[in-house]
Amino acid sequence: MKTFIWTTGTLGSWTAPTQWSGDDGLSYPGAASGPSQDLSFQTFGTSNLSLPAHQAAPSQTVATTLTIVDTGMAGAAAAGGTTSVVAAGVPTLTTLVTFNVTNGANPNAGLIARVTGDLFGTTSGGFGTVFEIANTAGSYASTPTTLVSFNSTNGGNPGALIADAAGDLFGTTANGGTNNGGTVFEIAYTGGSYASTPATLVSFGLGASPQGGLLADAAGDLFGTTYGGGAHGDGTVFEITKSGGSYASTPTTLTSFYGYNGANPWGVLIDEAAGDLFGTTSGGGANGDGTVFEIANTSTGYASTPTTLVSFNYTNGANPTGGLILDAAGDLFGTTADGGANSFGTVFEIAKTSTGYAGTPTILVNFDSTNGATPVPGLLADGAGDLFGTTRVGATNAGTVFEVTDTGFVTCYLRGTRIATPDGEHAIEWLAEGDLVLTKSGEARPIAWIGHRHVDCRRHPKPEKVWPVRVSVGAFGPRRPHTDLYLSPDHAVYVNEVLIPVKHLINGSTVAQVPVDQVTYYHIELPRHDVVLAQGLPAESYLDTGDRSDFANGGGPVRLFPDFSTRVWEAHGCAPLIVSGPELAAARALVGGFAATQSAA
């Protein structure tokens, strides 16, 4: 069900979905007409029930919450009135590539993407391959390009990939290598092309079998998991340290699983701003169907015992062999290879709450074999929040590459943008007036006000004025920001001791505007104008230049079409506002330089 607000003074006519419910919690059949100019709701259909009547003076605004409960009506829009009633689209899946054995088979790992949009992944058929799917003008090639074919001696059955700043690819193989216990490998990127033979960094002992890929921290250390081995034979989480440009040939074991807290981790680890590690185990847990776990990063190092966040029970999925991804709100997304409504696997979400994580996953997709089955790897999200992944089998039994849209994956300023505070980063919607945030100078300042406004871009006369701008990881330097950040076009970022609206730094790659249907913006006001850290990027706090009414809680009439580009920079600004001239050119050159480095990678 999708909930939204109909706000109006004088309503026109509209077409109702097959069924809908009102703010009294009751459901009603559809009808051909709806609210009219008397601002009262009519009786609908044959239910003989009517919604509460709302009487108001002509100058007043009436808000009523309606909930579409017929997903078949997704996308239907109301006509008339000052805003639209629009149901969000239902998730849809598109197959991008179908493997045919010759070009690879049975992809067992997730995908990674370059700034150009090209996708990279692995297949496990035979001894396995590393492949690329080119993105040209927004369209993906239907045939993959094979970069490396494994031969057992150099590894076999590769997992997911990662890439460093130079463009080199790193990954693991589940078997093969010197001891036939799997390897950690590197594929060098030189002169615009990839080596056709991988370099082996680590060979594991027999039985270890690192099924998942790798995670690299800021120091270049590599983290991963082994399916077996460890103190109890149920798998481990390991670290390979980097020193002086070289990697240790022996891994350090951080955690050994023992069944009830999980067994046989298969997926790739992820970390968040505090350095905590998150992952999945394909078995073990309370029900034996696998877990989602967290390993805390403490002042003395990583915890030796994982915290179980979710234990799967087959009905809500089973055997999560892929890793996880994290959205801007801190929610976790992943796949289970089995279980779910059709027993062919799922795509799931684990919501982050104010006290931790939900103990039960939300199922986004149940695979049914015709659209794919057994999604062994995890997921990749693009700038629009669409999720991509692979299934091991499908209509041709050689696997598929899929896309899931309308998932609720948070990418823009809707919620979840993480602001630095004295006790770590916190999602902006969890902050309140009086809470302390850190400025670029390291000082703690109390929040005086938090503004928010939801915008239906489809109804805006000039949507480009309100579409968010995506600032990609590292666009302004290492970990600036540390995760993709979404800002309103006129939100100023702090560069070279000046403030520049981010729209003036758009380059189409690392800083790019993203057309969206709807967006919710937040802004933080401090006692005086200052620069805060949003996901590691210095960006301005709110400065009241007479545009407070752009926000729903601004204390006055809300403008129908907010224009977040209207600015009168007063003497209260904490730094010069630059929109032209040599300082803007220097900032563009800085961003362009980092973009060129990422593109080369």
Image (spheres, helix red, strand yellow):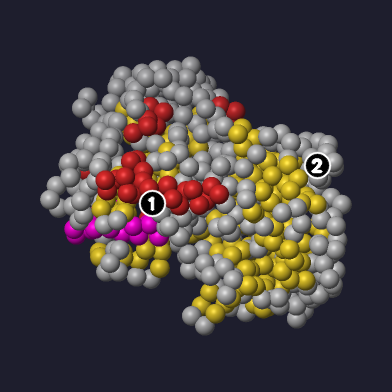
Identify which residue, 426 or 486, lies in the foreground. 486
Q: Which residue is mark 1?
A: 590
Vertical relation: 597 (above or below) 228:
above
Residue 393 seen in this snapshot: no
Q: Farthest residue toward the bottom?
A: 300
Vertical relation: 287 (above or below) 256:
above
Q: Quadrant of residue 403?
A: top right
Q: Is residue 38 left or right of residue 590?
A: left
Label 2: few (<14), some or many (≥20) within 10 Å?
some
Query: SS for tag 1?
Result: helix
- At horizontal 87% and vertical 52% (from top left) the residue drawn is 126
Which comes sooner in the sequence, label 1 or label 2?
Answer: 2
Q: Is residue 504 left or right of residue 346?
A: left
Q: Which mark is residue 103?
A: 2
Q: Position of residue 338 (x, y in %)?
A: 76, 52
> Can residue 487 be found in the magenta stretch?
no
Q: Position of residue 325 (x, y in %)?
A: 59, 55
- At horizontal 51% and vertical 40% (from top left) the residue drawn is 384
